[in-house]
Image (spheres, grey):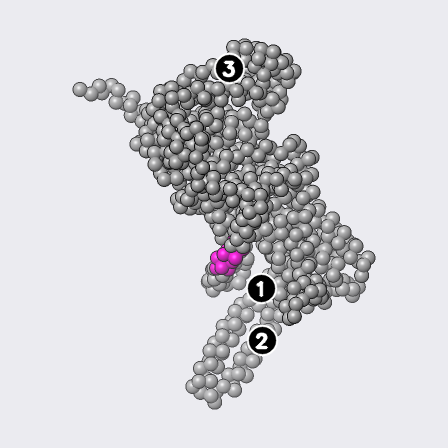
Amino acid sequence: MTNTSTVPKQQAVQQQKMTIAIIGNPNTGKSTLFNLLSGGHAHIGNFPGVTVEKKVGSVNWDGRPIDLIDLPGTYSLAPRSIDEMLAVDVLLGRQKGVPRPDAIICIADASNLERNLYLFSQVLDLSTPVVLVLNMCDMARSRGIEIDATALSEKLGQPVVCTEAHRGKGIQDLKAAILNIDPGSRHEVQQLFPDSFYAERSQLREKLESNQDESPPDFLIDRLLLDVGGYVESYFEHQTHIGLIDHLHEARARLKEAGCAVPATEARVRYGWTRELLKGVLQQPEVQQETTSDKIDRWLTHPAFGFSFFFVLMFFVFQSVFTWAGPAMDLIDGGGGAVAGVVESMIAPGPLRSLLVDGVIAGVGGVLIFLPQIVILYFFIAVLEDSGYMARAAFIMDRLMRSLGLSGKSFIPLMSSYACAVPGIMATRVIENRHERLTTILVAPLMSCSARWPVYVLFIAAFIPNVVYFSIGSVTLVTLPGIVLFAMSTIGAVVAIPVAWFLKRVCFKGDVAPFVMELPGYKWPSPRNVIYRVYSRGKSFVVKAGTLIFATSILVWAAGYFPGNHSEQFTLQEQIETVDASVEHAETQLEVARLETPENVESLEIQLTNLEATQSLLYERQNHVSSQLIENSYLGQAGHLIEPVVKPLGWDWKIGVGVIASFPAREVIISTLGTIYSLGGDVGEDDEGLIGSIRAATWPDGQKVFNIPVAISIMVFFALCAQCAATLMVMRRETNSWFWPVVSFTYMTTLAYLGALVSYQVGMLLI
């Protein structure tokens, strides 16, 4: 007979929401496991105040609602920065907006268990229920390693589950282990350290409690003693102001005298505990077998061949990003034009149509145009990460990047920025160290992205003589325009070297973090995992950064539209649309007449010629009116306002307007100059009319505005400036702060101004 009094209690437990934190070493399959457990339904953002990504998957298992929190990969719970402290705060329930986890999933690489159990031993000190996941068991077996999971579970007093996440094996067992946990339960923490350590902990607790209302958890006091110069030390010193550092020095000195020297004692104690734990549980061959991954690594991590292979692979990746994205970007651009055409056919010329076409549709297009590059780049990154090669790439590039104060993990984000800084900055998520990540984010926009090329092409074509320096027969190999284009494409990378050095030596003081990374075994990437990563990154960009980019586009449209009287412009647009339709109809009639009624051809040709003449006059008048409107707009007024500032660069107000208008996207300067010079906004960088107009532009005294020094000045400015709203908005999204976008915009604009100033002033001395 069922005891009915227990049914409501069982149902309440079943319906009680659980919070589960997932933690593990890098390259243990943590992300793959999280994606499987969450079913791909994860909310991605940033924890408040830090650059760390927040991934929360909300699921329902057998009627039990569960929130899964994916914490950053880490080798230990000894925080060195505020970002690394976040994982500790989440696990202790100290992170605002995140409840203390009811259980922790700690993932370990089954083929390297002794090393991975170091983190697990620290997790046990939290007294929260833990499920130990032995992942990649198939790889362990291939190396002759056998693990008795049942015996290990009995020794630990915690559930142990074997999984092969990349194959989806063991997931149901893991879910069952989680559901069997009693929320709110706690286990007794083992005393691993000598008695002298706990005596010092008690004294330290008394000192802290005498100056704080809240008693810190034992785990944080342990970290205070163990982590010399760590984040916990600086945090409590700032909070208490009680001479804590002096007390810690004295406590550590006493521990050293007692044979418990800090910090070496932690590694000795924890690895000793691990070795004792694994006796009778872990069996492995005395001589490690050479695996397929080892054989591949003999080539792919070779100083010469590995380096060459890496550069060939990177060339293929970035060439693919540049070329494969082209058709999709053209399709998006064409789709935007088609939608704009539909709107224009439905709404008469006026403020609403201008807002929709030039503001909303252009703004949406300005967001989506980046999506193909982001999707393709993240497809390659996901494949390289899931296959295990990404760790090798970071290892290969570490020595070169270390000379800049960065690690090998910074290379791919910086190279990505040559296609576009937006996916490049997003790719910095692979960098765990906060200072290295911020340094990489701040120098990434200096890489010369594809959006700068229209500016280079326009001014090189207009002002740089086509001097040939070297050729073989009819094949030209080295020309002056080619040299200038190469110089403009590399100047940002050259400047990035001292900038990175300055940031690491002055702003982010401290040695480069030790490059510690497990080299996981090679495996075939999981299609599901790759697709999920690409989808989540693309969605994150569109939803988070896209809204900011869109808002900026609307603001720039408004600045270029108001406060002018657009009535004549709208009238001209109506007349032009009518004449365009008449010209199209006349051309159709003429084609039919040539086939069926040749006698009508002459009169139709005269009619078409008259219509085309009227069309040309209307377009000319419209371009003139548009030029006047933009000059009198808030945007034009800003250009006139900054003319005294930019005049030392050789610029007039028109160039200033072009620079301001190009804030949503650098290449917009081409269409802006086309409008200002009464040519219309649909001109390209190779348009002969635009080239001729800027060559003929003059100052009020009749002197030419443009010459070679001015052209170089403009190109240098665009090569170094942060003139890209999308980049700054993504930077805001990734750092979770407006401070770093402001820093980036300020220092890059200053560099760009000084570079343009020197280019012009020195150039004028030489001509």
* Label 3 residue SS: loop
Q: Callout 3, which amino acid?
A: Phe
Q: Earlier in the sequence, mark 1 or mark 2?
A: 2
Q: Position of residue 41 (x, y in %)?
A: 40, 40
Point out the frontmost of discs 1 and 2: 1
Q: Which residue is mark 2?
A: 614
Reply above or below: 388 against 588.
above
Residue under the image location 53 percent in, 67 percent down? 574
Q: What is the C-alpha distance between the residues marked 1 and 2?
A: 20 Å
Q: Is residue 331 magenta?
A: yes
Q: Callout 1: few (<14), some (14-19), or many (20+) C-alpha neighbours within 10 Å?
A: few
Q: Callout 2, which amino acid?
A: Thr
* Label 2 residue SS: helix
Point out the frontmost of discs 3 and 2: 3
Q: Callout 1, which amino acid?
A: Asp
Residue under the image location 62 percent in, 52 percent down? 448
Residue under the image location 67 percent in, 44 percent down? 497
Q: What is the C-alpha distance between the residues marked 3 and 2?
A: 92 Å
* Label 1 residue SS: loop
Q: Earlier in the sequence, mark 3 or mark 2?
A: 3
* Front in this rendered view, residue 596 or 760: 760
Q: Which residue is mark 1?
A: 682
Reply above or below: 76 against 502.
above
- Is 609 on the left-hand or right-hand side of 9? right
Residue under the image location 34 percent in, 34 percent down? 170
| Stretch in magenta | 321-332
